[in-house]
Structure formats: structure tokens, C-alpha cells
Amino acid sequence: MGTEYEVEVGVVAHGGICVARHEGRVIFVRHALPGERVRARVTEGMPGDRFLRADAIEVLTPSPDRVEPPCRYAGPGRCGGCDWQHATLAAQRKLKAAVLAEQLRRLAHLDLDPVVEAVPGAEDGSGWRTRVRFAVDRAGRLGLRKSRSHEVVTITECFIAHPAVNGSGVLEAIWSETAEVAVTAAGSGERAVLIRPSGPPAHGRAARPRMDPLLDTDVELMPDVPAGVSATERVVERVGGRVYAVPAGGFWQVHPAAASTLTEAVAEALVPRPGEALLDLYAGSGLFAGVLAATVAPGGTVVAVEGDAAAVAAARDNLDGMPGVTVIADRVDHALAVGVGPADLVVLDPPRTGAGRVVVEAIAALRPRRVVYVACDPAALARDIAIFAETGYALSGLRAFDLFPHTHHLEAVATLEPAVPSGT
Ligand SMILES: C[S@@+](CC[C@H](N)C(=O)[O-])C[C@H]1O[C@@H](n2cnc3c(N)ncnc32)[C@H](O)[C@@H]1O
């Protein structure tokens, strides 16, 4: 730790870092860009280690893609919330595309040249984060953590947070006996503040980190912001003419353009036909099922599978009365093992860890004519695409979207279809 090396920065790697080499060692450098010469200070690892992590603390030869970070909290040793504030947005998308291509090449043995598409939003990539979980420092001030650290960098605004999050008043308040404060800014304009008290988790809470209400809060917030709401209370989102009530502490696509961008991309990739049976796995509050039900009508069915109780309850309400639509409350692997009926089409949107072998094999066993996989982690996606290939499903389409500007994250929509046997 602390040793400095002058290095040539090589290719980008997964996680907002670039790869450099120094005397036989690999150094993963943050705050650098491919092609730059930088002075890098080691942040993790000992001089004898083969792999080190470092921050570029001085740029000796800058990349033409380099810009001054627009956020005053971005930079070596500072807020860890963003990874690419020092690159133009166009360059960020190229870096993300290169990471996606590399994961597909390495894990799925596919040689592709994906493009990461921009989505509607502020030109400088600010103000898109509608759900932010703030950490609390010892003095009760809110902030975000440093990269790979528990240390909190206190902030008075977050460049990528939605204006309704920055304007909620939580960043000006002092939070005693509080471990975390999360702000949800719904598309409807509603806001909710979820407060997790410090101290040991109550029995039964530890296995599933959730926001819990702090009932005796006396913090002054802006008058329209309910503080200390329960994670299961709902806020309203609107997509494609439909209304969704979503648990304030539950999952919803974060970027304001994400839900519409992804539902359109999924529908376009699936090409549903009236009368078909569609399976929506990891369905959340019913986003895809709600939009896709009309595309298989009349006569089609949609089965949505979701494991979180609050999301299931919301999905049931959101999809209530839609003909042919059923919500199953279960783990996806278990539901598939027990049986979910026939499936002509499958959409799956698993968490960051991906679907995994058991789920992929169970989907393939249903022999759907098309599978659309919505993925927030390119490595998990590439691993699962390789498993699909073993089961006879080949990648037939891939789109990727820049739904998390200034961070290293991207969202991909991959289409898989039964591979055509050679000679047919
Ligand atoms: C990335 S979110 C997608 C939600 C929804 N498709 C959307 O766009 O709003 C993943 C969802 O999967 C659920 N989930 C995670 N692991 C699960 C599992 N093993 N079985 C069932 N649901 C799971 C989570 O509760 C969450 O709602």
C-alpha cells in the first residue's frame, strides 16, 4: 500500500478499472484510461503480490477521452460511487462495450462488437439515480462509501442522483443511531425516505437486508417527504400507459428512462404472438408481465415468478384483472422444478449474480422458441450464455444500454434461440 509506480495503462477491465503491468505484476488502476501514462499509487496489495490495485494520482500523458470530473467528490481516494467521471460519456460507453465484448469472448467464446446505446436523459449524465442508499458517518452525516472501503465520504449533493433525491433534505440532516438512509424518488413525483436504525438486526431480519422504519425520527425534512416509511409502502411509477405501485424499498429500474427502454427492447426481441405462453422470471412488481400481456392477447398466458413477498403482493395488485396473467410467489429455481406450464417465450431479469446453471437448464428444458435475458452484470450474462449454448440455445441478438452513466454498470438485453443444427 502506498507504493507508487509510473505505468502505461492498457485495456479496460470489468469493474471500472484498467489493466497496467509493472515488472511482471498486474496492476488494476482506477481513475485511469487506456493509453494513458500515469503515476499510480497502490491501494491494495503488497510489493510481492502478483496483482495489485492502485489509483492514478497523476496523469502524465492524458487520453483524448479525458475530461475534468463534473462531480467535486469524484477522484482518487474520494467517493466510490462513480467510476468514469474522468471520461466523456461517449468514451464511457465505448469502455462498457469493450468490457461486455471481453466477458463474452472469455466466458462464452463469442467474438462480438457490441454497442452500448445512450438513453434519454441529461446531456452531462447527471440526475438519473432515482434510488440512492446513503451511508452514515460517526457524526451522523450522510455520504457514500469510498471504493472497496467502509469509509464514508460525506456529501451535500450527488451529481448522478435525481434532483428529487438531492432536494429531499436528507443530506442536510444529522442522523443519530442510523445505519443507512435510502431515498426513493418515483416517476410520479412521490418521494420516500427509508431509515435503517443502527444496532444489531432484529431476529429474522439479518438474512434479508431490508429498510426498516425508524418510528421516532424527529428529523426535519422537506414537508412533502415522508421519513421513516416502511419498505413495503408503495410509490407510483408509470410505464407505457400503465401504472405500477412499487414497494418504496423494493426493486425498480433506477434510471428514469430504464423501464420504458427495457420493456420496448424486450418486446422487440421477443416478437410475441397472440395466443403464446410467456414466462416472466424474476418479475419484481410485474413490469415486463404488465406490458407484455397485451402482446400475447387474445388467448395468451403470462406467468410471472418472483421471490420477494412485497414485490409479489405489488405484482398481484398491478396485474390484477389482466386476462391470462398469473403471479407465482416462489424462488425461480424451485418454481421451474415444480413446473410452471408450457412456455413459448421466456423473459428473465435476474439479480447481479445471474440465473446460474440450474435455472438456465430448466428454462431450456421448456424448449421456448425465444428467451430474452435482461442482465445488469456482463460476466454473469456471459457465463449464462455459455450454459445456454450447452443446452442448444444460441445468442441471436444483443443490445446494451447506458442506464448508469458515470459508473461502470450497463444493462444488456440478450436474445437466445434454439441453435439451428448445421446442415439443416
Ligand atoms: C433485477 S430485478 C428485476 C425485476 C423486474 N423484472 C423489473 O424490471 O422491475 C430482480 C428481481 O428478482 C427477484 N429475485 C432475486 N432472486 C430471486 C430468486 N431466486 N427467485 C425469485 N425471485 C428472485 C428480486 O426480488 C427482484 O425483484
Image: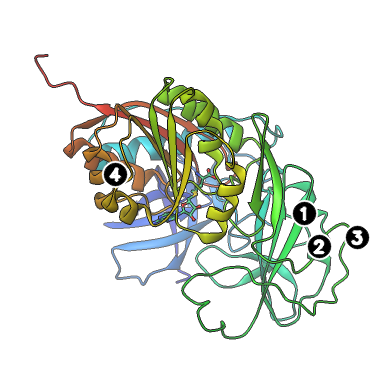
Q: Position of residue 146 (x, y in %)?
A: 58, 65
Instruction: Give the residue pinned by disc 2.
Output: 226
Let me know if residue 23 appears in the view. Answer: no
Q: Distance between the residues labelled 4 and 3?
A: 47 Å
Q: Please determine whether, in this image, residue 126 is positioned above or below residue 40.
A: above
User: What residue type is disc 1 on?
Assistant: Arg
In contact (CB < 8 Å): disc 1 and disc 3:
no
Q: Where is residue 29 in the image (x, y as percent from the top left)?
A: 45, 54
Residue at the (52%, 49%) spot, across then down: 284
Instruction: Give the residue pinned by disc 4.
Output: 384
User: What is the quadrant of residue 46 in the picture?
Assistant: bottom left
Q: Please tell me whether mark 2 sits on a helix, a strand or a loop.
A: loop
Residue at the (55%, 50%) spot, across then down: 83
In contact (CB < 8 Å): disc 2 and disc 3:
no
The dot on residue 223 is 3
Q: If the image is split into quadrants, where does the C terminus sit? A: top left
Q: Earlier in the sequence, mark 1 or mark 4?
A: 1
Q: Which of marks 4 and 3 is nearer the N terminus?
A: 3
Q: Please tell me whether mark 3 sits on a helix, a strand or a loop.
A: loop
Q: Please determine whether, in this image, residue 386 is positioned above or below residue 204.
A: above
